[in-house]
Structures are given as C-alpha cells and as structure tokens.
Image (cartoon, grey):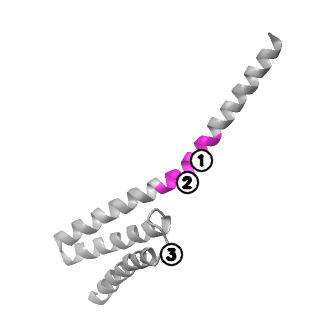
Amino acid sequence: MDFLLEGFGVLGLLLLLAAFVLNARKHTKRRTILFNGLNFLGSMIMGIYAIQKDSTAFILLEFIWAIIALYFLVSILHERHIKPMYRKKIVNVKKKKKKWVYARALWT
C-alpha cells in the first residue's frame, strides 16, 4: 500500500514540477489553462498525499495552492467563454435598437 501512496505523491509532484518547468522555459504563461490546471491537479494530489501522511502544514499549503489555482482557472474560463457570450448578446441588442431608431425616424 505504501508503494501506491508514494507513487500517488510522485504523480502530484511531477504535475507541479511540469507546471513550473513549462513556465520557467516560457512554454506557457501564468494565466493559461495548462499552467493553472497542472498546478490545481498537482496540488490536490499532493494535498491528499499530505492527509495520508498526516502533515498539517503540508495539507494547508497544498489546499491553499489548489484554491488559488482553481480561482485563476475559473477566471480564465470566465474571460474566454462567458464574457464573449454576453458581448454577443449586447451587440445584438444594440443593433436592434439602432434599427428601431432608424425605422422610427423614417415614419415620423
């Protein structure tokens, strides 16, 4: 069982190191899904590993790291996917208003 637990911890460590190395070698930026996704998954795995090892300081570090990475993941997804949907709707409403105003000006 210890072998599986250690392998689980090494997997989390490799994910965190991959995020760090990709950023350090400028293959990814800090505000990308890849960087923050690797950080989130790695820190969650390391947090679970820390719970199994009963290390309070390590548990806090990893779960705070995971919360920060999750915050940036959600904000990136919000910027890329949700904001453009609202922009399209607002643009369409504005175009309809302009057409309505133009049509109303013709009739008066």
Instruction: Point out the stretch of residues depicted in magenta.
Output: 76-88
From the viewer's side, name the closer residue of 73 and 28: 28
Residue 9 placed where, x, y %?
Answer: 31, 81
Looking at the rendered structure, the secondary structure element under dot 1 is helix
Mark drawn on residue 84: 1
Mark 3 or mark 1, earlier in chain? 3
- As drawn, the residue found furthest toward the right would be 106
Q: Amino acid at mark 2?
A: Arg
Crowd around label 3: few <14 · some 14–19 · many ≥20 (10 Å):
few
Measured Cα–Cα span from mark 3 to mark 1: 26 Å
Disc 2 to disc 1: CB gap under 8 Å = yes
Q: Position of residue 68 (x, y in %)?
A: 34, 60
Q: Position of residue 48 (x, y in %)?
A: 29, 72
For disc 2, the marked residue is 80
Residue at screen point 49% across, 64% down:
33
What residue type is disc 3 on? His
Q: Nearer the viewer, residue 41 or 48?
A: 41
Q: Which residue is mark 3?
A: 27
| Local SS, label 3 | loop
For the C terminus, give its image quadrant: top right
Q: Is residue 57 left or right of residue 10?
A: left
Of badges 3 and 1, nearer the viewer stands 3
**Is residue 26 or residue 76 the one in the foreground?**
26
Say which label, 3 or 2, has the lower sequence index: 3
Q: In which quadrant of the rendered image does the N terminus lie?
A: bottom left
- Give the overall secondary structure of the magenta segment: helix
